[in-house]
Image (spheres, rainbow, N blue to C red):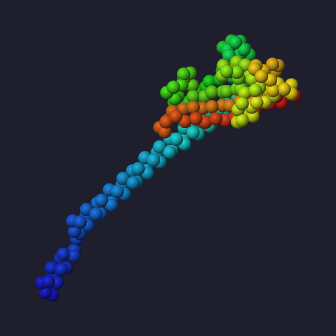
Amino acid sequence: MNLSQKTARRSRSGFTLIEVIASATILVIGCLGLSAAITSSGRLSELTRERMLAHEAARAQMEQLENADFGGSFALYNSSKADDPSGPGTAPGPNFAVVGLNTQRDDADGFVGEVVFPTLGGLGQQLSENLFDSHIGMPRDLNGDGVVGAGAMTGAYVVLPVRVIVRWRGPAGNSSLEIDNVLMDRTR
């Protein structure tokens, strides 16, 4: 073996500085990508958890509405304390908390959940048949007299549209979830 063959063999053993730098760069880029994927996965997991909490709370609230005495469900969950079935201030009212969810910054009542009926002027105290809300089938004859009246509804309702809303603040900012339903008097 001559001297030039020995030199050529030695220069081929090991890595050059450029190969080491290129390998390290590829490794760093791969680690950064993996780190970003893990962070994104954690955030997505938190968003999914919040959405699940909101959906479960809205569904449970809707179940309570469905299981309440139909004739008193509006009085139980409207904003007026004066018409509470067991006396003023005894009904749950329209707002409810959801453990694990934070209120939005501009939320005045401090609750993430709300029960909404088709009422006049948003006051939540008088049902109205002529409000427009296609999601809950309004306007609609609520008292069964065959007429969709203007203003406050007269008589007892036989159909009660309701919306349960959960609004919260999470890592992605403000979020909300709504469930719409129409309750009916099953005793008739």
Q: What is the quadrant of the N terminus in the image?
A: bottom left
Quadrant hosting residue 51? top right
The residue sitting at 54% across, 38% down in the picture is: 50
In front of the other: 116 or 148? 148
Q: How many marks?
A: 0
The residue sitting at 36% across, 55% down in the picture is: 31
The residue sitting at 60% across, 32% down in the picture is: 166
Residue 185, visible in the rendered structure: yes
Q: Is residue 47 above or below residue 1?
A: above
Q: What is the quadrant of the C terminus in the image?
A: top right
Q: Residue furthest bottom?
A: 1
The residue sitting at 84% across, 26% down in the picture is: 147
Where residue 73 sits: x, y (%)? 74, 23
Where residue 13 sits: x, y (%)? 22, 74
Where residue 108 sits: x, y (%)? 54, 22
Q: Is residue 69 above or below residue 170?
A: above
Where residue 21 sits: x, y (%)? 25, 62
In front of the other: 7 or 126? 126
In front of the other: 57 or 165? 165
Tell whether 84 sits left or right of 107. right
Q: Residue furthest left?
A: 3
Quadrant hosting residue 146? top right
Quadrant hosting residue 66? top right
Residue 72, visible in the rendered structure: no
Q: Is residue 33 above or below residue 77?
A: below
